[in-house]
Image (cartoon, helix red, strand yellow):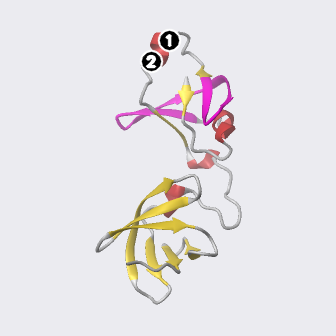
Amino acid sequence: MKVFSFTEPREAVLQYKGLLIGRDGTWQPARVAEGQRHGKTVILRLEGVDDRDQAAGLIGAEIGTSRTELPEPGEGHYYWSDLIGLKVVHRDGTALGTIKEMLETGAHDVMVVEGEQERLIPFVMNEVVIGVDLSRKQVDVDWEWD
């Protein structure tokens, strides 16, 4: 199967022992039998999925893992799931809203901030993002908007 992996590096998804396949809010355990990186995707075979028809039944499914399977992010790095829902505050104290989702653009990640209006703010540490405080559930930014 072709998998669009959001792990870094992309093929890290192949190493998760507690892999889960999700569809319609239901998650089932799965195990990778084999796989490799293939361009911008990962190709893998799951144990028990032995033919094209079984694989086709998984089109559109999500792959995930429990948080305990993930390594701790390094200094200045964050899992998107930790950022979603945090308040975004401008350096002057103006509350801009809450992170609704994160987008990958290739150059850098972008926060979709929902407030009085929706804002797209680049997630560039030490330039735009001047602080992330998970305990306070806040991201401080130095970013000018129109």
Asked whether the viewer can see residue 131, the reply is: no
The residue indicated by pointer 1 is: 52
Question: Which amino acid type is marked by label 1?
Answer: Arg
Alpha carbons under labels 1 and 2: distance apart: 6 Å
Residue at 28%, 74% in the rendered image: 116
The residue indicated by pointer 2 is: 56
The answer to whether residue 23 is left or right of residue 33 is: left
Q: Position of residue 89 (x, y in %)?
A: 45, 80
> Disc 1 vs disc 2: Cβ atoms closer than 8 Å?
yes
Instruction: Classify residue 11 by image quadrant.
Output: top right
The answer to whether residue 29 is left or right of residue 17 is: left
Q: Quadrant of the C terminus?
A: bottom left
Q: Which residues make up the magenta segment?
A: 19-44
Principal secondary structure, stretch drawn in magenta: strand
Residue at 50%, 11% in the rendered image: 52
- Compared with 29, 57 (above or below) is above
**Badge 2 local density, few (<14 within 10 Å), some, or many (20+)?**
few
